[in-house]
Every structure is written in structure tokens, then in C-alpha cells.
Amino acid sequence: MWGEIVGHKREISILTKVLEKGELASTYLFSGIDGIGKRKVAVTFAAASICSKDNRPCGTCPDCSKIIKGVHPDLVEVEAEGEGEIKIDDVREIQSRIKYAPISGKRFVIINDAHRMTTSAANAALKILEEPPIKNHFILITSMPSNILPTILSRCQKISFSPLTEQEISGYIVSKFDIPEDVARHVAMLAEGSIGRAISLNHESLKTLINEILDVTRSNDTTRLLVAAERWSKDGDHERLPFLIYLLHRFIHNALLFKLGFKDRWGGTFDEVSAILEARNDKDSLIRKAKVLNDMHWQITKTYNKQLMLEELLFTLLG
Ligand SMILES: [Zn+2]
């Protein structure tokens, strides 16, 4: 089960040491950006504590199986509905579940998005955490620790989760989805450390976009460029324009690295678009283009005439 988690070697090593020493804290706070697997680590940590096999969590014993299915009586999970809040009734539900001794010897209560507790829910939670019943362990998960009551925070053993690296995300994407490695790299770049975001991105749309950019760059043909600008500006996919600018920025950035004699961040070969741009531009021109793209990144959502902006953008890039 630990092996299925992408990244977080440091965080997992802290937790497995805790288990080896048998020194579980009563309350943990797992913080870090959304979509990086904090909950998965929390569930696996609970399984590792409850599983009684040598290689814990084994992932196959009755305890592990129930935890994986989300039906273990000693794993209680709370989360807000949709975009809503965690209410006092949700905390009362926790209270009623922890009244009795755990069946397996330990119980874990996971509060997802703990920053979404209402004031009354947070105060009720604080009461529980002040005097947690023995053999009960709480894991609060959050991307916004500053929105949690300081009195709750002060009771938590804090573990902050780093964003995943692009290599970690790309490796995962390639293993799970039928997309080529170069597209997976771009997905990883756009995901900005979050595997949740990497999964939610439209891989097909991205693959098409990269091919179109390559096509326009290769041909360096003004007519094609104008056609592409018109098509892209009319595309209903709202994520596409930021994607496009981000991608073009990365291509220029890579071309600049290439020009200066560095390897790309993957330590491998540069993509074809970057290689073409590198061959066509001198260093100053690449720096200037990178700046234009960076400025555009901030303007795109405010711009009414996207087609005009895209035309300018592409002329700047290729010209
Ligand atoms: Zn097990």
C-alpha cells in the first residue's frame, strides 16, 4: 500500500518511524496543496497501524481489505458535502462513533478539508481533541492550515506535504493513462505539483494542442498561424488558452536553456518545438519573447479580443 503512493518519501518515512517506535500522536495535521495524496497517506497510515501482519499494511488481510473498501469500523472519515462546510452534526457523529472502544485496538478519525469546519464544528472538535479517548487517533487534512483554529493547531503533530515533482507526476500519468511520455511531461508541468490536477486536465485536448503548435512552428507559415489563432480563440474549452500560453512559455524557456548550453529539467533531450525556436532566435530575442509570454499570461483572462491577442502572441513567438 505504501508502494502505491506517488512521491512523499520524506513524509512516509516520518510516519513509518512513528509506527516502528509505537509512538503515535493523538492528533496529526497533514497540510499541503490539494490533490497530492494527503488522504491516501492518511488511510495507508491508519491501515499500517491497524494491520497485524509483519509487512504492514499488507493490503490483503481482512483489516486492510475493509480499510481499502472504506468499510472498516475503526476508520471514521468526515468530509464536507460538495463545496459546503463541515457542520456540528458531522462532529457529533464522530463523538458517537468514538464512544466505544475500537474493535481492532486502534481507531483513526480522518477529517478531510478540516479548514471547512464551521466555528461551532471546530469548537466541538477542539473539545474532543483536548481530551481524546485513548486508542483514538485523529488526522486533520487541509490545504489551508491558517484557516484552522490556533487552539486546534497547537494540539497537532504537523506534517507538511511537499508538492509532487514533475517527474513523479509524469511517471504516474504514463503508468495510468494511454498518453505518450512527452505529453505526460507537459501535463506534469501544468499540474504544478498536484496529481489531482494532472488527472483532471484534458489529456486529449493537450495532446492535440501540442501537435498543432508543433505544426505551426515547423511550417513557420503566416497563413497557418492566423488560422490556428482564429481556431484557438474560438475554442470553447476554457482551460485551453491558459494551457496554450503556458506551453508556449515553456517552449521558449526551454529554447533559452538550450541556447545557454543547459540541459532541460528532465536532463534529456529538448522537445522539437524548443529546438526549432532555439535555432531561429538569438538569446536576446528569446529573453524578450519569454517576457511577452509572461505578461500575456496575466492578461489573457481580461482580454476581450482573444483572437487578436493570439495572433500577436504567435507572431511574436515565430517572427
Ligand atoms: Zn493487512
Image (tube, rainbow, N blue to C red):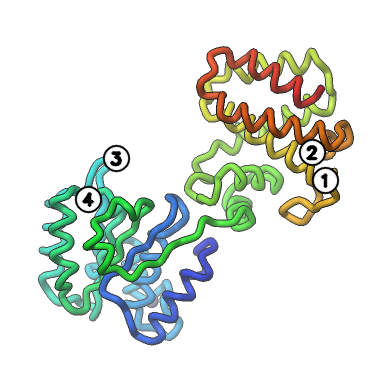
User: Quadrant of residue 189 in the image?
Assistant: top right
Q: Earlier in the sequence, mark 1 or mark 2?
A: 1
- The x and y percentages for residue 61 are 37, 76
Q: Nearer the viewer, mark 3 or mark 4?
A: 4
Q: Nearer the viewer, mark 1 or mark 2?
A: 1
Secondary structure state at the residue bearing disc 2: helix
Q: Residues within 10 Å of mark 1 (few under 14, many from 20)?
A: many
Instruction: Name the residue beneath numbered marker 3.
Output: 83
Q: Earlier in the sequence, mark 3 or mark 2?
A: 3
User: Quadrant of residue 76 in the image?
Assistant: bottom left
Instruction: Name the residue beneath numbered marker 2.
Output: 274
User: Quadrant of residue 153 in the image?
Assistant: bottom left
- Residue in view at x 70 percent, y 16 percent: 311
* Amino acid type at mark 3: Glu
Residue 274, placed above or below residue 88: above
Q: Nearer the viewer, mark 1 or mark 3?
A: 1
The answer to whether mark 1 and mark 3 are in CB contact below 8 A is no
Q: Quadrant of the C terminus?
A: top right
The answer to whether mark 3 and mark 2 are in CB contact below 8 A is no
**Number of the label disc, if any, that sits on residue 117:** 4
* Amino acid type at mark 1: Phe
Instruction: Name the residue beneath numbered marker 1.
Output: 258
- Residue in view at x 50 percent, y 63 percent: 5
Residue 57, placed above or below residue 76: below
Label 3, label 4: how many angstroms apart (C-alpha)?
Answer: 12 Å
* Amino acid type at mark 4: Met
- Residue in view at x 51 percent, y 70 percent: 10
- The x and y percentages for residue 218 are 84, 28
Q: Quadrant of ligand 1?
A: bottom left
